[in-house]
Image: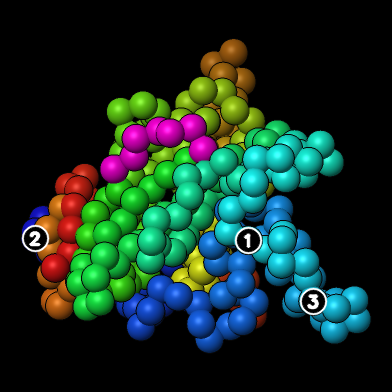
Amino acid sequence: MPRNSHTAPAVPGIDLDFRPTSYWADNDPVSAIVQNIKGQNRRQMARDFMADGMDQVLGPIDEHYVQDTLQPVDVQQLGRLHPRFYGGEYLPDYRAGEVEIARVVQATSTQDVFTVRARRVSPGGRFYYRVEDEYDTNFVPGIRSSRTPLSFAQLVHLIDNVSSDECELAGEGLVVGWITCSLDNGQDVTDLRSFISVEGAVFEQLGAYYDVRATAVLDEWEAALRGDDDDDHDDGEDADDEGDDDHGDDGGQDYAPLPTPAPSAEVHYSVH
């Protein structure tokens, strides 16, 4: 495979060539406020509160609860309401100039969160990427740096090629990898259908994209199980941004179109 290639399976209705001009969601005031809030429930509450116009009725949301990071005592107080309020609150603090560009949320009892972050050390310099969870796991992103913001396909490549020596990802990254490992470990298909959700900040279609891919994996697994049942019954990285082939052969997988209205084994570590 060419050294500059970053493949991503195509999904109908998703523009894999989309590339934001900036990682900061400045065009949408609500997204700008919630983008770096670590707590998953807090960011959803803030988003719902402002999107539903409740700030116009009840006044501005308490700034204390839209801070990127809460004090430990405040986290504990929220956790007493429900353990899911812990989700995301124990992610590492943001470094100077760092912004979240994607997150993967697992519907565990405490709502485990994985964050994909970008940081530009100097004006006009490279973006550097890191992937973190709430347990100090050492992750290596599929792309470590780039000169410009990633395209949609490149972000997918980064997520699909995340690796770690400390947890099993089946060589398929944070979303498909976790699903595959869970299936291999006997997790029920039905439970996994709503187990993982993805958010993309300025990549607004990222959640829909991974919904389609996760559904395809689970449908295929379920079909294979039905086939087994029938059989049993019968028997008794560096690369350049310019010229990238961001998306290509997806291994023959056909994905269903998004509802209306709606990788290569080689790991590339940076994008020039």
Camera-nearest residue between 61 and 5: 61
Q: As displayed, is residue 262 above or below residue 211?
A: below
Looking at the image, tell me whether mark 1 or mark 2 is earlier in sequence order.
2
**Mark 2, secondary structure of its residue:** loop
Q: Which amino acid does label 2 sit on?
A: Pro
Looking at the image, tell me whether mark 3 or mark 2 is earlier in sequence order.
2
Residue at the (17%, 47%) spot, across then down: 266
The stretch in magenta equals 134-140
Camera-nearest residue between 16 and 269: 269
Position of residue 232 measured from the top left corner of the image (x, y, whole percent): 56, 19
- Quarter location, residue 164: top left
Q: As displayed, is residue 229 above or below residue 170?
A: above
Label 3 to label 2: alpha-carbon separation: 52 Å
State the mark number for residue 169.
Answer: none
Q: The N terminus appears in which quarter of the rendering?
A: bottom left
Q: As displayed, is residue 133 above or below residue 65?
A: above
State the mark number for residue 60.
Answer: 3
